Image (cartoon, rainbow, N blue to C red):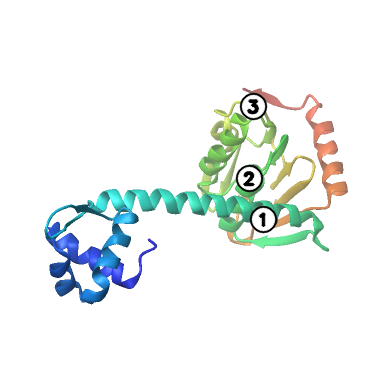
């Protein structure tokens, strides 16, 4: 929390007394008397203790819950600022990669990447889901609701249901609470997420007798804008075909 070793020792010592003199704090904390007044002044300046005038001066500890709450807020603000700066650098560099195609293995990593892509949307999202992993719908709903509240236009084509690792997952029903148009159609066992016609991920998985085997899932994350735009246009073409049931 930005304290020196001496400051930490002095604050911990004072926390055990609530209020004490500099001499007492020095004796119990191990901070030399030649340093204790400077240390205590620094702690007061940082808001960890309060000084009461008198002879001798009295030093009182600020309740730890107040200190930690302030530090928690400050640390979160610093982390949020750092995340925003690094995220901007990261997202600006993705399209400049010499080979903007990556393979992602494992359901958990794939879902995290899906949520990341959804969170980057500025204008539009096109989603096709022939299958879902276990516990995925709730995570996608949370991410999509955030995007929809920002005014992102979303189109979703979803299979009625699928079976993953022996568990039935009601896809279209699970997404039905979203404030966007959803079309239901029994599409193949494939998923696609297209963001702003600039970025997309295709997700494939092996299946046995109609049951998706999540351990075999692979995501193909693609940043070739020309290819992504073409797939988005094909998606919109399929969207206009009257093959679907509609949910709102």
The first of marks 1 and 3 along the sequence is: 3
Q: In the picture shown, does residue 116 fall above or below 171? A: below
In the image, taking residue 142 as reference, residue 49 lies left or right, namely: left
The first of marks 2 and 1 along the sequence is: 2
Q: Which quadrant of the view contains residue 29?
A: bottom left
- What residue appears at the point 39 percent right and 63 percent down from the top-left corner? 2
Q: Residue furthest front?
A: 55
- What residue appears at the point 35 percent right and 69 percent down from the top-left corner? 4
- What residue appears at the point 81 percent right and 27 percent down from the top-left corner? 241
Residue under label 1: 205
State how far apart marks 3 and 2 are (Cα). 19 Å
Q: Which quadrant of the view contains residue 245?
A: top right
Residue 8: percent from left, percent from top? 29, 67
Q: Are marks 1 and 3 in contact (CB under 8 Å)?
A: no
Give the quadrant of the C terminus: top right
Q: Secondary structure at mark 2?
A: loop
Q: In the picture shown, does residue 206 fall above or below 247? A: below
Residue under label 2: 131
The first of marks 3 and 2 along the sequence is: 2
Q: Secondary structure at mark 1?
A: loop
Give the quadrant of the N terminus: bottom left
Q: Residues within 10 Å of mark 2 (few under 14, many from 20)?
A: many
Which of the two residues, 171 or 163, is positioned nearer the viewer here?
171
Q: Residues within 10 Å of mark 1 (few under 14, many from 20)?
A: some
Q: Can see residue 188?
A: no
Which of the two residues, 82 or 183, is positioned nearer the viewer here?
82
Residue 132: percent from left, percent from top? 60, 46
Label number found at residue 146: none
Residue under label 3: 180
Q: Are marks 2 and 1 in contact (CB under 8 Å)?
A: yes
Which of the two residues, 120 or 73, is positioned nearer the viewer here?
73
């Amino acid at each position: 929390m930005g304290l020196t070793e001496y400051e930490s020792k002095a604050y911990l010592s004072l926390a055990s007394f609530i209020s004490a003199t500099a001499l007492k704090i020095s004796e119990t904390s191990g901070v030399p008397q030649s340093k204790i007044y400077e240390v205590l002044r620094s702690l007061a300046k940082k808001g960890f203790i309060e000084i009461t005038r008198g002879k001798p001066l009295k030093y009182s500890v600020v309740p730890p819950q107040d200190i930690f709450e302030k530090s928690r807020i400050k640390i979160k603000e610093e982390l949020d600022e750092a995340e925003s700066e690094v995220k901007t650098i990261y997202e600006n560099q993705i399209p400049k990669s010499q080979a903007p195609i990556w393979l992602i293995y494992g359901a958990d990593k794939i879902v995290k990447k899906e949520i990341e892509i959804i969170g980057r949307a500025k204008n539009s999202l096109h989603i096709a889901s022939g299958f879902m992993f276990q516990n995925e719908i709730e995570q996608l709903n949370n991410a999509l609701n955030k995007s929809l509240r920002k005014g992102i236009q979303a189109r979703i084509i979803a299979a009625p249901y699928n079976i993953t690792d022996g568990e039935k997952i009601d896809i279209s029903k699970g997404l039905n609470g979203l404030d966007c148009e959803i079309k239901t159609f029994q599409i193949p066992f494939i998923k696609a997420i297209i963001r702003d016609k600039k970025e997309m991920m295709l997700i494939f998985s092996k299946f046995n007798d109609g049951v998706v085997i999540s351990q075999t899932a692979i995501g193909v994350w693609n940043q070739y804008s020309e290819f992504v735009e073409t797939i988005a246009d094909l998606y919109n073409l399929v969207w206009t075909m009257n093959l679907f049931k509609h949910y709102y």
